Amino acid sequence: MNPLKIIVGLIIIAGLGVAAYAFNPFAEKAEGLVNTLGTDGVAIKGYDPVAYFTEGGPREGSAEHTIDYKGAKWQFASAENKALFEADPEKYEPAYGGYCAFGVAQNALVKIEPDAWSIRNGKLYLNYDQNVQKNWSEDPDGYIEQANEKWPSLAAKQ
């Protein structure tokens, strides 16, 4: 088969995917939904999302370093982490609004435990607990694919 035809076909397929997302009536709702389960409007149980990247694990945030983002309060362990998040929130915010990534793959919005986490391809994924984290670790790419498909409509129900 002609390599040029393959490349053009891939570009068309990619373009259709972008167009489908752009016209998805659930996309905006999904992008704004943040996990504040069990808190008073605080995202991801008050943990610093930047610390997962800069310190290699969970660290509690502080009310002293708080911002409002997507309708939730995000707390950070330091002014530096807060500034990093403000400069590029999409880089640091967890996938699926901070809900359990495995749960989203199973079509459910459930709580997380901050010590059940992973970073894949530069994105933070949180899980329900360590047991669920083990299941997640068996096929993270497969679960991410499932969660990506289910997230927009699941989030729109909220």
Image (spheres, rainbow, N blue to C red):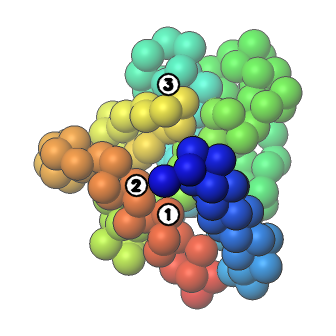
Q: Residues within 10 Å of mark 3 (few under 14, many from 20)?
A: many
Residue 79 visible to the viewer: yes
Q: Does the image show residue 39? A: no
Three-letter amino acid code of the residue under disc 2? Ile
> Would you place residue 150 above or below residue 64 in this image?
below
Callout 1 touching callout 3 (CB < 8 Å): no
Q: Are marks 2 and 1 in contact (CB under 8 Å)?
A: yes
User: Rounded to the nearest whole Å, what is the CA distance between mark 2 and mark 1?
Assistant: 6 Å
Secondary structure, mark 1, is helix
Viewer-closest of 105 and 8: 8
**x and y percentages locating residue 103 in the rendered image:** 34, 65
Q: Which residue is at the far front?
A: 2
Spatial separation of the CA atoms under disc 1 and disc 3: 21 Å
Q: In the rendered structure, are the residues bearing label 2 and label 3 in contact, judged by CB atoms less than 8 Å apart?
A: no
Look at discs 2 and 3 and give the one toward the viewer: 2
The image quadrant that residue 50 belongs to is top right
Residue where numbered disc 1 is placed: 148
Residue at 43 percent of width and 34 percent of height: 120
The C terminus lies in which quarter of the figure?
A: bottom right
Q: Residue 49 carries which label?
A: none
Say which of 105 and 33 sits in front.
105
Give the labeled residue for mark 2.
144
Mark 1 surroundings: few (<14), some (14-19) or many (≥20) residues within 10 A: some
> In the shown orientation, is residue 48 left or right of residue 106?
right
Can you identify the residue that label 3 sits on?
Answer: 52
